[in-house]
Amino acid sequence: MRLLQKVGLVSLGLVAGITISFQFSAVADKETVATPLPVEELHEFSEVFGRIKSDYVEPVTDKKLITDAIAGMLNGLDPHSAYLDADAFKELQDGTNGEFGGLGIEVGMEDGVIKVISPIEDTPAYQAGIKSGDFIIKIDDTLIKGMSLNDAVKRMRGKPGSKIVLTIIRKNVPKPLEITLVRAVIKVQSVKSKLLESGYGYVRVTQFQEQTGENLAAALEALTKRNKGPLKGLVLDLRNDPGGLLTAAVGVSSAFLAKDALIVYTEGRTEDAKMHLTANPENYLRGNGASDYLKGLPEYFKTVPLIVLVNGGSASASEIVAGALQDHKRAVIMGTQTFGKGSVQTVLPLGNNTAIKLTTARYYTPSGRSIQAKGIVPDILVDDPDTAGRDNIFSLHEADLDRHLTNDRPSDTKSGSSIKSEPALRGPAEDTTKMVPTEFGSKNDYQLNQALNLLKGIQILQGR
């Protein structure tokens, strides 16, 4: 098994059972390292186990106690390590094909309530108008306060076609909003594209899935044909993209970088967790014998003026792509500071169709930057009208999560500077009372319009 297949989860991974956006790469099959067991602590665990069995107010099965203990061990590590029961593990595997069941929201827990990081495009939550920064305070008739994130996630799961009512609070809206959603089996279109106008193309990546690289290559070739020749400029939109497969992130980056350019490297405690991934087919093709989908891509995509749009919902695999293109000075990064998830998770099946998702490494951009709990700071800061004017507490990042991994390179200021002190272009703030989805790529997309203006300016300067 190739190293790349062993460490392949690079997504936000906060909502197993809602969107299952952490993508399944492959199984690490190495043997567990033998270490002495802590006898005294195990004796204490056994004593507590026995007390619960004999004295708890209601009978509890051995399976429940042991399963909850495993889940507790993993939940105590960091926000992205987790125990996956049979349902969550199956949804995780299904998610790499762009299909899963649920509502379609990336969430985290803060101060005892659920905070929405971002809705996934073309899902029930997105269509219902749920926004980044919304707080979910009630699920149906049950208050969230005091409930664990996993318990809240389980309540939001359900049979496709069934209804659920979420009560949310939103900045600048005086009363809580009740939103009725219908659970669905969701098929996410990973890559979307269109010709903005003659000479200028737009490609949006909503999630990094198994076929994202191939879909991107096809979209770029289609744009060239539609334009009847090479493009003058291209916008790559990674806003609200929570991440996904590492192979897909390497493939997307490779479409725009010179062959063998370093894209990302990882460091962890084991040799399997240490990788240097470059713009080379062996690092982005999944499986032996797979054809190189970038081989026939027009060469001009290595040099075409490129703007990458990001925001606080851009996480992990999205940050890998943005960081690589920024470090190689291949693209101008525009938007707002990204989420800041710089860790890699490995999925380890346990048998009985269950698994654990374990954080095994940190990843770094080509210049050695760690984005963990920092994020990528854009070259040009342009506020998202969807969040403009909101207080900073309504902008959730990795550093806000309980038990988040610290950044092991705190002296690195390039990726960690705060956007508060930087001037930013700001579009008209959205009416926060409206329950309408954010339309990325529309004519009223302020950040996209700013990107297009910059591309036209670059074209004028190149002409001179």
Image: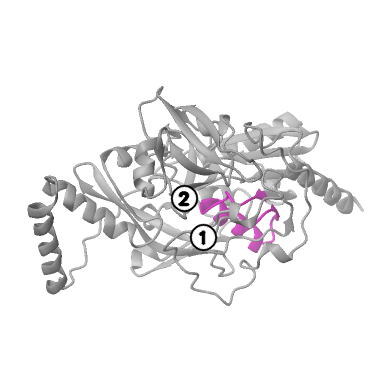
Identity of the residue drawn at 25% across and 59% down: 30
Crowd band around label 1 with a 10 angstrom C-alpha radius: few (<14), some (14–19), many (20+): some
Residue 400: give its label.
1
Residue 93 visible, this orientation: no
Please check the rendered image and state whether residue 324 is part of the magenta-colored stretch, yes or no: yes
Total marks shown come to 2
Which label number is shown at residue 384? Answer: none
**What is the span of residues highlighted in magenta in the rendered image?**
309-337
Residue found 74% across the figure and 52% down from its top: 382
Mark 2 vs 1, N-terminal side: 2
Q: Locate residue 218, reporting x and y percent.
A: 59, 35
Residue on which disc 2 sits: 108
Q: Nearer the viewer, residue 105 or 36?
A: 105
Crowd around label 2: few <14 · some 14–19 · many ≥20 (10 Å): many
Q: Secondary structure at mark 1?
A: helix
Residue 10 lies, in percent from the top left, at: 46, 53
